[in-house]
Image (tube, grey):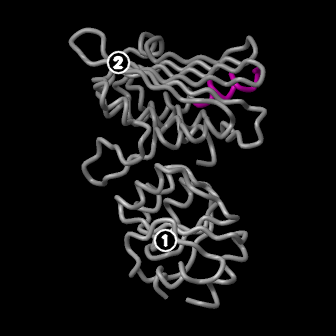
Amino acid sequence: MKVSELAETEGFRAIALPEPGREIEGCYIGDLLSWVMGRAREGNAWVTIMSNINIAAVASLADVSCVILAEGVEPDAQVCETALAKGINLITAGLPAYEVAVKLSGMI
Amino acid sequence: MKELSLNILDIAMNSVKAGAKNVDITIDEQGPELNLTIRDDGCGMSPEQVEEVTNPFFTTRTTRKVGMGVPLLKLAAEQTGGKLTVTSRQGEEKHGTETKALFYTDHIDFTPLGDIVSSICTLIQGSPAIDWHFVHGRDGKTVELDTKELRQVLGDVPLDSYEVIKWIEDYLKEGYSSI
């Protein structure tokens, strides 16, 4: 499934979609950024509640297909700008991380 | 990072890369406040670089475009209600960088210090030509190691020889058992 399709799904909302055509391959959940850096795989949808600028850097390093902010978390304005500039897809979801993953698993 | 000692390792490696001859690592704990200072006499940074150093998309690396050492330390400090400051100067005479982080150890998001002894030993073993000065004070008690003093006793024995590193490890562990 493409990131743009996920963004249109009920309960999800796009914050920044510079690369809407990226394919979602699997999912990784984690908030400890240094841990995620080494473990999230290329193409994963990364689900987190962290919302500071460092998530853009981790997403870029791990080359995830998108970052999904769970629990309705909104990123700082600076994060949006950086995501657009660095080609990182950002999506927010009102659901907790577990429920985001459950929903994802039925779709990808 | 799951341990603050790994953040310290990361930041001290910046001092190594900056060509420092002396690196001071100080941890000062008073009540709930923990002050971490890493000071070096390396090449230092320009004001523009200092400005950008907490930005994860700033790095001196050429192999990738993202540098996470300082941003992650800043995050770890701010998560506890603390802060991070970096000051630096370049030039002929006094040059170097000082990274200071304040943590509140009674905050639930405080990252435990972890295995600081391993981090110090790793740094000394990895860069034995540098003089390392480590001080950890906790409510009036202190653990301290100064490789300058060690060298005077050791003479020609290199700092990174197995026996010396093992001695440093045991010495620090013993120190920690009393603070």
- Magenta stretch: give its range: B169-179
Instruction: Give the residue at x 31% y 25%.
Output: B47
- Magenta segment, principal secondary structure? helix
**A5 w.r.t. B65: above or below:** below
Q: Is residue A31 left or right of residue B57?
A: right
The quadrant of the picture occupied by the C terminus of chain A is bottom right
**B121 w.r.t. B95: above or below:** below
On whether residue B15 falls in the magenta region, the answer is no
Mark 1 vs mark 2: in front: 1
Residue A16 location (% of width, % of height): 46, 66
Read off the residue under disc 2.
B41
| 1 and 2 marks in contact (CB < 8 Å) | no
On whether residue B178 falls in the magenta region, the answer is yes
- Return the residue found at the far left: B92
Read off the residue under disc 1.
A66
> What kind of element bears circle 2?
loop
- Give the amino acid at mark 1: Cys
In-front residue for pair A105/B152: A105
Q: Quadrant of residue A88?
A: bottom left
